[in-house]
Amino acid sequence: MKEVTIYSDGSSRGNPGPGGYGTIIVYVDENGARHEKEMSCGYLNTTNNRMELLGAIRGLEELRYPCICHMVTDSKYVTDPFNQNWIEGWQKKNWRGASGPVKNTDLWKRLLKAMQPHTVSWQWVKGHAGHPENERCDALAVAAALSGDLSVDEGMIV
């Protein structure tokens, strides 16, 4: 299987408010050449957590073949459910956590579906700490949120 690293970040200008995600997919081929693909999209009314999830989702959905994926994000909201094994409990309890219903279940389910063909590991990095790809993802997310070309976040409950 090919090995890729997906960096992602989300942003919301108000919470809820206009938001966006930024994602970078990195693949180093057998000759050592680095290939990158950047993606971003802005949304009219959303939350930071929804954009954090959507950045990871879109990176995985972009892959055409099963891969070993190293997901890197500054969002513990995204990494902890996998690294702390909460997601399995949420599913067993019909998407209920320790403090009640899990928010953004539409995106959690979409993320799980996007992960299915891949072997995925999750890594948290400190945000706004000089990590080059995380900083770039943040810039992509903010630019998308501030752009005039905003989509509707269909799953956003108003």
Image (cartoon, helix red, strand yellow):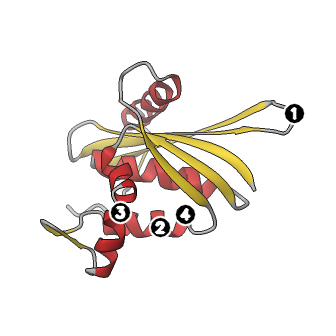
Residue occupied by mark 2: 112
Which part of the image, by quadrant, shows the C terminus?
bottom left
Secondary structure of residue under mark 1 = loop
Q: In this view, does 40 lie to the left or right of 46?
A: right
Q: In this view, does 130 lie to the left or right of 37?
A: left
* Other-residue count near label 3 (Cα within 10 Å), few / some / many at <14 / 14–19 / ≥20: few
Q: Distance between the residues labelled 2 and 3?
A: 13 Å
Q: How far apart are marks 1 and 2 (CA)?
A: 32 Å
The amino acid beneath tag 2 is: Leu
Q: How far apart are marks 1 and 3 (CA)?
A: 36 Å
Q: Nearer the viewer, mark 4 or mark 3?
A: 3
Lower sequence index among marks 1 and 4: 1
The amino acid beneath tag 3 is: Asn
Secondary structure of residue under mark 2 = helix
Residue occupied by mark 3: 85
Image: 153 above or below 133: below
Lower sequence index among marks 4 and 3: 3
Looking at the image, do the residues carrying marks 4 and 3 touch, with CB atoms under 8 Å apart?
Answer: no
Residue 36 is situated, as x and y percent measured from the top left of the image, at 68, 35
Q: Distance between the residues labelled 4 and 3?
A: 15 Å
Residue occupied by mark 1: 31
